[in-house]
């Protein structure tokens, strides 16, 4: 039955996260960007909200709450409304935990999920993107060769979110049959972790590169075990997650531009009374609504276990384009002031630009 | 719960509508070229269709709500063709205006007629407060005397009566404008011509002239009471009806866009162009990449339209949303049909295929029921908390 109605629970989650984002994330965003660091206390306070742990089944030590991808997409939108870099950081551990939950073997679940059920923030990262131009999600250059019972993985990864803190990496690599994901411990032999990368946006979010030189991975550490896993499904999930983040960011831009334009006077009246500005704001609103519907559709299809490859792709294509347009025009509405780091719009523009090239680095 | 799937019953209704729409599609070219309105009686397949096809089940509380189904129905029937139907659909825009602004007695009296709605004049369209068709009460005969000209009246010829906007006092602006019902055949009411158009050529669009046209005093919608009210019967009532008609016009245009996408997809498949939703820029052809973008625009627009209708079904305000979906669809259908032509090249403009016709037909979506610019005005006012005077 076609319905756009949030459940009561979803409304509560939305309101709670909206408040948290306004109180804790928005005020911290600029400082994190300037210092390229996220304070431990912030990560810890979010950890205590239970973003990751509550949805892990009780048998592994989690809260055992039902996981809804639509709800999680709403969560990401709200967090990103506060700050996109912090949003990705706070749900960082979930990307790994959810990948194990959705695709892991029983053994993998028993081994890895309890890591995320402790009192303290615990990070493990997805390693999907690679250095060099133009990514092809299903054609990574990192290779996995069979060796004995297990595998040998070689290649390079980049933009590994919070890899500086990660205990494990889920490394996407190609084997003779297709693409697989391999769990690699931080101290694995042959793995080199770079210093944090220097990026245009999301600067608070430390990302690292990985060099894998004939890293040996046991058969049991291929995601899904012997059966392997459906990597496309992970990519779809990530597309929807990143779309939710871009949506939250877009709304932040619009909500910043509205009062600013009503206040700013030029040629004897507020600039918001000029159609060129007013229509731009209308356009931002139209696109926020359209983006949310695409995100919800893909999330809902994924949640129902339907093939959502096309819908997730629509999210990636459409939301990237429109969020970039909104972030870019956020600067334009503020004019020269938009270019100055006193206002957040230049930062949101850098965030959007950075988010739009990511793939496979987030999850709901 | 947030959900984007159809129930079995929904699906049966959709399939039934699609089958009917496919029959209409066969006649699309002929009636476009001949610019005649299709009379359903001449559709030979209609009778056979109804004889052979069992009616679909009716939706219940567990199924998609009626306004959303209405939008889906509008999409599907226009996917078949903009104008041609197996069955003639009932009312026109004027019927919506009558239900919004008419007294119960008026609704009872005229509700079964096909009513067109004539606001636009040669001198005013987007700004209906400039309406100059006049209505003057003749106290001796208790009649309104109407003088003026209306253009671009949808269902103008087929309509049995029209709801017009006329002013009692031009200097009063909006407050002076009231709605009146004029029946066809009233002396002084002429239909001088049918408009010649870019698209939706088989659709009946007409011009009206009123010269000393006399109608009973009781033909003022909302009755005498509405004279003293600032905007009753005119603006407010009609504006309220737009909350459902705007999503419907969006849906109609989207049906044409969907037809264009289906045609383009088939042609790409035939040419061996693969569309891979997972692929990045290296392994995807430019044609496929472009096509995916058009599909994404379509889906965004379709969902946004359904959302506006869903809100209506929930009894929630959807003023902003109906403008949002109309504005979005207006741009989307232009981008999609024109983008499909770009992908297919010369085939896209050939009159041997329907793509060029869908492109012409759907161009109206961003114009009537408030242009894209007017929708943006409404949305911007909502965002900025501005009145009409603040932003125009
Ligand atoms: C096929 C067809 C069917 C129609 N059916 C009906 C019908 O049944 N009944 C009826 O009453 N009318 C009908 N119309 C009329 C239609 O609603 C008007 O054409 C439309 O509202 C635009 O008015 P206009 O043509 O006078 O354009 P104008 O008002 O002259 O506008 C010209 C341009 O200026 C822009 N513009 C105007 N004001 C502003 C503003 N404030 N800010 C920014 N831009 C602005 C417009 O967006 C447009 O781009 C129909 C039209 C067509 C073509």
Image (spheres, coloured by chain):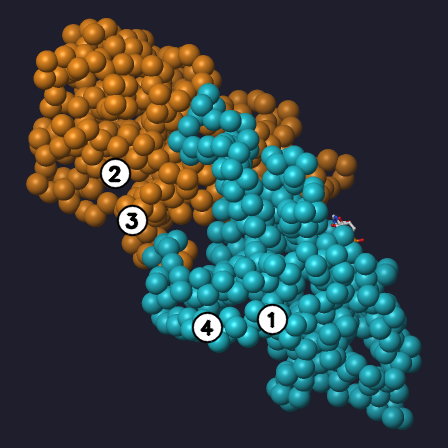
Chain colours: A orange, B cyan
Sequence-first tag of 2 and 3: 2
Tag 3, which chain? A
Under circle 3, the secondary element is: loop
- Asked if A203 appears above or below B363 in the picture, the reply is above
The residue furthest right is B212
Question: Which of the two residues, A101 or B342, is positioned nearer the viewer here?
Answer: B342
Tag 2, which chain? A
C-alpha gap between disc 4 and disc 3: 36 Å
Corner quadrant of residue B142: bottom right
Q: Is residue A133 visible?
A: yes
Q: Write down the residue under mark 4.
A: B52
The residue mark sitting in front, 4 or 2, is 4
Q: How would you rate the neighbour count of disc 3 (Cα within 10 Å): few for under 14, some for 14-19, many for 20 or more?
A: some
C-alpha gap between disc 4 and disc 2: 56 Å
At horizontal 39% and vertical 53% (from top left) the residue drawn is: B4
Corner quadrant of residue B283: top left
C-alpha gap between disc 3 and disc 1: 43 Å
The residue mark sitting in front, 2 or 1, is 1
The percent coordinates of residue A142 (x first, y second) are: 30, 14
Is residue B76 shown left or right of residue A108? right
Same chain under badges 4 and 2? The reply is no
The percent coordinates of residue A171 (x first, y second) are: 25, 20
Question: Which of the two residues, A66 or B226, is positioned nearer the viewer here?
Answer: A66
Is residue A121 shown left or right of residue B50? left
Q: Write down the residue under mark 2.
A: A51
Corner quadrant of residue B216: bottom right
């Amino acid at each position: 039955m076609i319905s756009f109605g949030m459940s009561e629970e979803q409304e509560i989650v939305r309101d709670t996260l909206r408040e948290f984002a306004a109180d804790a994330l928005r005020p911290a965003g600029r400082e994190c960007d300037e210092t390229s660091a996220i304070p431990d206390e912030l990560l810890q306070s979010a950890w205590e909200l239970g973003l990751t742990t509550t949805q892990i089944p009780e048998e592994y030590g989690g809260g055992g709450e039902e996981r809804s991808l639509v709800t999680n997409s709403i969560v990401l939108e709200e967090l990103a409304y506060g700050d996109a870099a912090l949003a990705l950081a706070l749900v960082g551990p979930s990307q790994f935990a959810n990948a194990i939950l959705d695709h892991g073997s029983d053994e993998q679940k028993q081994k890895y999920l309890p890591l995320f059920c402790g009192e303290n923030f615990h990070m493990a990262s997805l390693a999907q993107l690679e250095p060099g131009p133009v990514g092809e999600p299903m054609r990574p250059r990192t290779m996995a060769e069979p060796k004995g019972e297990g595998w040998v993985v070689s290649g390079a990864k980049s933009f590994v979110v919070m890899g500086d803190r990660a205990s494990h990496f889920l490394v996407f690599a190609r084997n003779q049959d297709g693409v697989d994901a391999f769990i690699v411990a931080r101290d694995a032999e042959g793995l080199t972790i770079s210093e944090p990368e220097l990026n245009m946006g999301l600067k608070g979010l430390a990302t690292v590169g990985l060099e894998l030189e004939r890293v040996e991975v046991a058969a049991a550490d291929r995601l899904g075990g012997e059966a392997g896993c459906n990597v496309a499904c992970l990519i779809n999930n990530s597309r929807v997650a990143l779309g939710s983040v871009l949506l939250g960011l877009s709304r932040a831009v619009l909500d910043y531009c509205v009062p600013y334009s009503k206040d700013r006077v030029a040629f004897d009246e507020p600039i918001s009374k000029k159609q060129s500005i007013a229509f731009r704001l209308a356009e931002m609103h139209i696109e926020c609504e359209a983006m949310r519907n695409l995100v919800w559709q893909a999330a809902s299809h994924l949640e129902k276990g339907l093939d959502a490859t096309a819908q997730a792709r629509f999210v990636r294509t459409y939301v990237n384009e429109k969020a970039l347009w909104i972030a870019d025009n956020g600067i334009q509405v503020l004019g020269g002031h938009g270019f100055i780091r006193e206002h957040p719009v230049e930062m949101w523009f850098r965030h959007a630009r950075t988010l739009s090239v990511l793939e496979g680095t987030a999850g709901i | 719960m947030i959900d984007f799937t159809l129930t079995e019953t929904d699906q049966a209704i959709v399939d039934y509508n699609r089958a009917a729409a496919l029959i209409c599609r066969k006649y699309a070219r002929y009636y476009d070229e001949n610019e005649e309105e299709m009379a359903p009686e001449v559709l030979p397949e209609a009778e056979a269709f109804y004889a052979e096809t069992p009616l679909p089940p009716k939706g219940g509380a567990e199924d998609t709500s009626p306004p959303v189904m209405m939008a889906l129905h509008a999409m599907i029937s226009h996917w078949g063709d903009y104008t041609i139907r197996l069955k003639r659909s009932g009312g026109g825009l004027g019927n919506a205006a009558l239900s919004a602004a008419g007294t119960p007695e008026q609704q009872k009296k005229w509700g079964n007629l096909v009513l067109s709605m004539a606001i636009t004049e040669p001198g005013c369209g987007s700004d209906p407060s400039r309406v100059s068709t006049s209505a003057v009460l003749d106290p001796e005969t208790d009649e309104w005397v109407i003088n003026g000209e209306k253009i671009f009246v949808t269902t103008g010829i087929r309509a049995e009566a029209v709801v017009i906007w006329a002013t009692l006092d031009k200097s009063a602006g909006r407050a002076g404008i009231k709605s009146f019902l004029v029946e066809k055949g009233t002396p002084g009411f002429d239909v001088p011509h049918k408009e010649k158009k870019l698209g939706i050529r088989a659709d009946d669009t007409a011009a009206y002239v009123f010269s000393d046209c006399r109608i009973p005093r009781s033909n003022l919608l909302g009755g005498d009471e509405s004279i003293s009210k600032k905007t009753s019967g005119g603006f407010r009532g009609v504006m309220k009806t737009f909350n459902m008609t705007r999503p419907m016009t969006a849906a109609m245009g989207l049906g044409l866009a969907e037809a264009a996408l289906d045609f383009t997809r088939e042609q790409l498949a035939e040419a061996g162009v693969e569309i891979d939703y997972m692929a990045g820029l290296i392994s995807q052809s430019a044609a496929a990449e472009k096509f995916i973008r058009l599909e994404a625009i379509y889906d965004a627009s379709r969902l946004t339209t359904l959302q506006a209708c869903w809100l209506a079904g929930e009894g929630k305000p959807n003023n902003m949303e109906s403008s949002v979906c109309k504005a979005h669809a207006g741009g989307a259908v232009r981008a999609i049909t024109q983008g499909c032509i770009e992908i297919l090249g010369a085939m896209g403009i050939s009159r041997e295929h329907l793509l060029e016709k869908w492109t012409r037909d759907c161009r109206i979506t961003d114009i009537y029921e408030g242009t894209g610019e007017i929708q943006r005005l409404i949305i911007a006012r909502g965002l900025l908390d501005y009145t009409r005077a603040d932003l125009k």
